[in-house]
Image: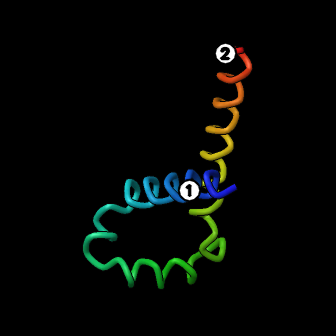
Amino acid sequence: MKKELKIFAGIFLVLAVGMHYKEWLDHPLDHLRTLFTLEWFGLHPLVITLAVYLLFVMVRGIVRFFGK
């Protein structure tokens, strides 16, 4: 479970920094504060991360299935 949480957090960080590079460098705390005032109640980063994580899990499962 810890390993999966680390993978999820890693995907989240890579996507967050990749999509909002300038905001994270200029004013990271303000960027985090405004996250919860946005539409979707600030959940869009988690939804996008979950989608990428599920894709990662599916690919990993397919590789394991054909690897045996």
Location of residue 48 in the rendering, given as x and y in whole percent from the top left corner: 60, 54
Q: Residue 60: x, y in percent?
A: 64, 31
Q: Residue at x 44, y 60 (%)?
A: 16
Distance (Cα) linking label 1 and label 2: 24 Å
Of 57 and 64, which appears nearest the observer?
A: 64
Which part of the image, by quadrant, shows the N terminus?
bottom right
Give the answer, above or below, for where 23 lies relative to 5: below
> Measuring 64% from the left and 69% from the top, which residue is drawn there?
43
Residue drawn at x 57%, y 81% is 36
Looking at the image, the residue that sits furthest to the left is 26
Q: Quadrant of residue 5?
A: bottom right
Mark 2, Cα crowd under 10 Å, few <14 / some 14-19 / many 20+, is few
**Left or right: where does residue 11 sit relative to residue 47?**
left
The type of residue carrying mark 2 is Gly
First in residue order: circle 1 vs circle 2: 1
- Residue 13's place in the image compared with 53, above or below, is below
Amino acid bearing label 1:
Lys
Q: Which mark is residue 67?
A: 2
Q: Secondary structure at mark 1?
A: helix
